[in-house]
Image (spheres, grey):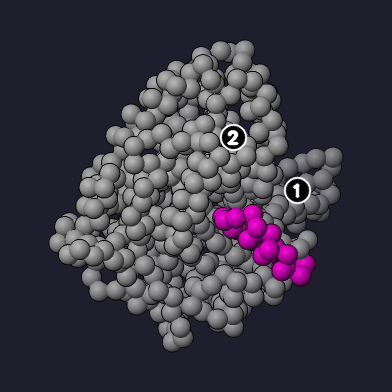
Amino acid sequence: MDRLLDTLFPTAEEIPEAYRLGEPLEQRDYLVNGELRRWDGPLATVRSPVWLREGDEEHQVLLGSAPLLDADTALTALDAAVHAYDKGRGAWPTMRVAERIRHVEGFLGRMRLQREAVIKLLMWEIGKNLKDAEKEFDRTCDYIVDTIGALKELDRRSSRFELEQDTLGQIRRTPLGVALCMGPYNYPLNETFTTLIPALIMGNTVVFKPAKFGVLLIRPLLEAFRDSFPAGVINVIYGRGRETVSALMASGKIDVFAFIGTNKAASDLKKLHPRPHRLRAALGLDAKNPGIVLPDADLDNAVSESITGALSFNGQRCTALKILFVHEHVVDSFLEKFQAKLAALKPGMPWTPGVALTPLPEPGKIDYLNGLVSDAVSQGAQVLNPGGGQSRGSFFYPALLYPVNPAMRVYHEEQFGPVVPVVPYSDLQTVVDYVLDSDFGQQLSLFGNDPEAIGRLVDTFANQVGRININAQCQRSPDTFPFNGRKNSAEGTLSVHDALRVFSIRTLVATRFQDSNKQLISEIIRNRQSSFLTTDYIF
Ligand code: G3H
């Protein structure tokens, strides 16, 4: 392991030409009211999780800097969004759906041109490996395409009138107002855009603040945002959340709060809003998804799903398997197979072909993970895998901890990193109680093959979590399926289809079904005197 760690970080010359960076990027631009403005105030230093070897020394790569806007400047972005919405009378919220779709298609075309730049920055800023970085970019583009398709479908269904109890009505989904969109550092592009794009396409205006890491990778998209939407429809700000976002929420002018992060931060920000009943929230929050291995499980499958479930992107996924309960009759064999698979995961730099384990972007994370491991070890757990828990700079080699029990912090805390706690059980009720008593309720995985046992557990857990995965790891995809959570794990449901509903409200235009009204409505439609009252069919 020492040798591996000694040579883990490359020298500058060892970085393949295609992935080298130039000079540090001093990013001073932010987008307000259709203009890229220059910030002359203080900047935040942006560092990479990648370190470089130079002789006997290793140092963290400096990537550049990003604006640290103050509250007043953040409020100018909010004012631009409020102005563009213009109490629902702005050009964007009143635009015909087909036209709004054209703007988003224009943006998507421009975004695709930045694929290489964004993928490179995903690797350098958050340490995501090349394959996953490419997947994140392409999945985001697919999400936009699917969102456009879903909106066309929604609009086609709204283009007809309905007759109920002598009342003629047309129902359409309309925007809510100004949306604040904030994504997480582990999917700084994808998860942010799964709220940002639906918010925009439904006619809301937006203030978008990039995640705490994965900030510079939004820069290549700023011109595309600026040129693809009317002024003020999308505004991009940077800075510390407690300074900028707090001011936005306290203004009372945010109508929709889309946030992926911790439940504590979400609660603190929601509380700042002076009229909470007027704030709709779409939140993706903490999770501690368990994997439950039953005695009759196919262990090869359970292990391979648990390895990717627990360790892809180093366990930094809200959907990661964060605790494994394995029946005592199969636990030895499970652990043996797990260790073999874990040993085959390749550590390295994000661009190294086939690499699975990469450095972590969060400062202080290595200390936190060491703290979890030493707490568990001091209470009787062992790190089973050779080299488990060893670290260098920002890199932490995964630790397989066994046996874990409720006295240990890792049994309860969301590690969000490469520590895999395994709890042996004999009485399934202890596992059921863990799920029932947990503060989280996003997903879980069941591994087993007995129809009676799996059927019963599905019923037991159906009211506890948002998704039960059978013989498969937890995950968000496919994006057309609902993604949500109970308890502290989420508010609202996202999917391509649901997100359009989260960022809109149905408005009904109704009239008594009588000749004079029929004639009136027919004329409005024939003369195209309304964007709402229309039977246009979007192809
Ligand atoms: O971090 C949470 C993400 O939504 C997980 O998405 O399951 O597709 O990795 P994923």
Magenta-drawn segment: 255-275
Identify the residue under disc 2.
405
Q: Position of residue 490 (x, y in %)?
A: 64, 48
Quadrant assignment, res 357:
top left
Q: Residues within 10 Å of mark 1 (few under 14, many from 20)?
A: some
Q: What element carries label 1?
A: strand
Whether residue 272 appears in magenta in the rendering, the answer is yes
Which one is closest to the eye, mark 1 or mark 2? 2
Residue displayed at 44% across by 62% down: 363
Check contact, mark 1 vs mark 2: CB within 8 A. Answer: no
The reply to whether residue 317 is visible in this rendering is no
**Is residue 448 depicted above or below 99 in this figure?**
above
Q: Position of residue 250 (x, y in %)?
A: 70, 73
Q: Nearer the viewer, residue 231 or 39?
A: 39
The reply to whether residue 52 is visible in this rendering is yes
Q: Nearer the viewer, residue 364 or 103?
A: 364
